Image (cartoon, helix red, strand yellow):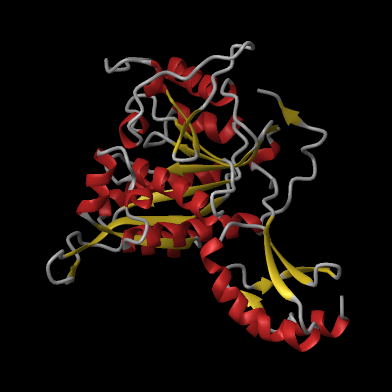
Amino acid sequence: MNPIFLEQTKQDIYFDPLTNKPFNFSIDNEKQKINVILGYYAFSNINSYSKILQPLIDSYYQGFSLNFIFEIKAHNVSNNIPRLDNIKNIIAIVSGKGGVGKSTTAINLALALLLESNNTANIGILDADIYGPSLPTLLDINHKPEIDENKLMLPIKKYGLQCNSIGFIIDNAPTIWRGPMATGAFNQLLQQTKWDNLDYLIIDMPPGTGDIQLTLAQKVPVTSAVVITTPQNVATLDAQKGLAMLNKVNVNVCGVIENMSQHICSNCGHAEDIFEGNGAEQLSELYKIDLLGKLPLNANICKYSDLGKPIVIASPQDNISIIYREIAKKISAKISLLKKDTQHLFKVMKI
């Protein structure tokens, strides 16, 4: 490509706003296109990126148009654990305590990633909360996964996602298992599901820092983790324990999300803090991680979740859905900056 053009793209005004780095270009002279290769999903940003870049393109390549390409790569994982076959990146959604909206956040982020790929991505979600699985309710799925000839579970498809959960397999009776049994069930769900070439697998982890969390940290090739909290101090203290565990076992942390940050009146739009504290901001400052976003307390999130149709799908233009998509783009972009996995061709864990 024109070296002067490439030098111009290194100016701050032409940087990728999500990565704060120069865009990656290639040229297709035959089709008169300049390809912009993104290592993350951000379909809703294409128009704004075009406004930044098209004038520059016109200055050096008159008559050429922009073409945006998403290329999701596998990235290095925690503790050099062999990467699972057919899964490029695993994102663990964690919380220090229950009741902070972790499962609802996980499913909406998975769907937001799919929408930001313009429905071209392979996204999976695994409900690893063995004692309290939420995915059957959140997606209104009430049947078991099929088993193939190799005795692998086929993920259930819903809204374009590949899904599995212990809740699909057992009935509504309480799961009374000791730690090793729960950990074994988690490993089986992860490794004996026939995932289909996933760009991202979102794992909705059980709350706390118990056996399953340690298994995830020590034996599962996690690319990055996202911590969910709420503003009040009790949630922040528990989330801090989760962050400390992730740091201790060398799991990359993408950032923190604050749920229930405010209540917004449905009549007048007035925003009011209903919990004292600013938990996510404190965690962000203490652990030097990004505050990925804040989600207000909103009745529609609960309403659509109970109907088995998460808000990102049920009401894509809702401000809440837009916030989820903004957070999903940040997570995808941050993962794109991690070191690429160059060992997967030689060291892959079969499932």
Q: Quadrant of residue 341?
A: top right
Vertical comparison of 299 with 305: above or below: below
For this rendering, which residue is in front, 67 or 174? 67
What is the x, y in percent for residue 92? 50, 41
Q: Residue drawn at (36%, 28%), measured in percent from left and top? A: 141
Where does the C terminus fall, quadrant-wise?
top right
Is 257 positioned to the left or the right of 190 in the image?
Answer: left
Is 143 positioned to the left or the right of 231 in the image?
Answer: right
For this rendering, which residue is in front, 339 or 53? 53
What is the x, y in percent for residue 231? 28, 58
Is 339 positioned to the left or the right of 241 in the image?
Answer: right
Vertical comparison of 258 with 176: above or below: below
What is the x, y in percent for residue 130? 39, 24
**In this view, which residue lies farthest toward the left?**
267
Where does the N terminus fall, quadrant-wise?
bottom right
Is 267 positioned to the left or the right of 216 in the image?
Answer: left
For this rendering, which residue is in front, 44 or 346? 44
Q: Residue drawn at (15%, 65%), measured in percent from left and top? A: 265
Vertical comparison of 142 with 228: above or below: above
